[in-house]
Image (cartoon, rainbow, N blue to C red):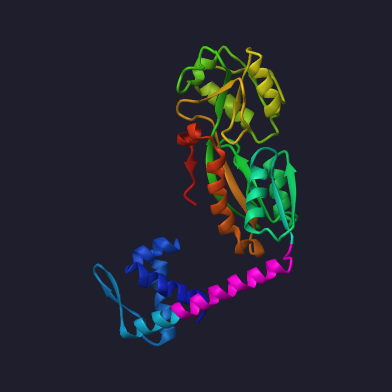
Amino acid sequence: MELRHLHVVLTVAEAGSISRAATSLKIAQAGLTAQLRRIERGFGGPLFTRRTDGVELTELGRHVVSRSRDLVERFDDLLLTARKLAAQSGGTGIRLGGVAGAHAPLLVGVVRDLLPNHPQTTHVERNADAVLELVRTGKVDVALVTEFPQSPLRIPEEVDRRSLVTEPMLVGVPVGHRLSARAEVRLSDLADEEWAVPDENHGGGRLNLHLACEAAGFTPRCTHFGVDPASAAELVRSGHTVACFFPTGHDLPGIVLKPIAGNPVHRRVSLIWRRRTETDDYVDDVHAALLRAYHVRVRVRHRSALTVAAS
């Protein structure tokens, strides 16, 4: 009998139903039923009475649940006090990573707030594949990466991932542009515009833009290549160019950012870390804090275009 088995019993007792408990534990109902039978054999008798509308604790079950709550609470207290003691003594360093852009600094700030006594280093790369390799080889503990639907990442077996948000690509046009007053624009409205586009090796955004434009019936007139967001913004302000930006970017005076109808171009932002390492202990807290920080960072007028990942 292990501590994780007590968590299972407590979850079923609190849910009052094996199906609801299976959903909470994110496992199949049949798998939970089989596991619960093994646990009951370990305790020497049934912990629950099965009913059509759920389960009810037996006398043995009430005894086990009462004692289990005390054990689990004491164990959680042990973890909390041990982590605080480790932090007070300096702890270990945390190595962070990410693709060049606004996401890596966001991760740095979140981890600094959560683990202020742990020294940090940050590794920023030009593409997600390089970041994945750093995590796979253990050179980075936790990182943020982005990917486009037409350019999916190949996640190594050693690396775990949790989705953060799906970001829409926004079109930047100069103030006073013929489309600047619209709530959203169609890609086909931009068929005659000149585009500033990033380096093709920088995450796959250029490829996905091309594919979306072709699906809308035209090939984009890309005239400025390999530009970073700052350079793209200057070109847009000149009044002769449009470019794509994301909600997490900096304020862009003189530029109006417009959602694209149907959100045809978007990217997924994910938190990644190496499996079965100390990062497992704090990744839940980092993910939750990142979600909060992300929505604070993104301007309110773009929030309706965002889809928060389920997990």
Please name whichever residue, 224 or 118, is drawn nearer the observer in this view of the structure: 118
Q: In which quadrant of the rendered view does residue 273 lie?
A: bottom right
* Residue 169 position (above or below residue 177): below
Give the residue at x 53% y 48%.
292
Please name whichever residue, 91 or 57, is drawn nearer the observer in this view of the structure: 91
79 falls in the magenta region: yes
Q: Decide if residue 157 is in sight here.
A: no
x and y percentages locating residue 154 in the rendered image: 63, 46
x and y percentages locating residue 180 in the rendered image: 51, 17
From the viewer's perspective, tell me whether residue 193 is left or right of residue 216: right
The kind of secondary structure the magenta stretch mainly shows is helix
Give the residue at x 68% y 58%.
116
* Residue 291 position (above or below residue 49): above
16 falls in the magenta region: no
Please name whichever residue, 163 or 231, is drawn nearer the observer in this view of the structure: 231
Residue at the limit of the structure toward the bottom, as seen here: 44
x and y percentages locating residue 25 in the rendered image: 44, 64
x and y percentages locating residue 149 in the rendered image: 55, 37
Please name whichever residue, 57 or 50, is drawn nearer the observer in this view of the structure: 57
**Start-end of magenta stretch:** 69-92
Q: Decide if residue 250 is in sight here.
A: yes
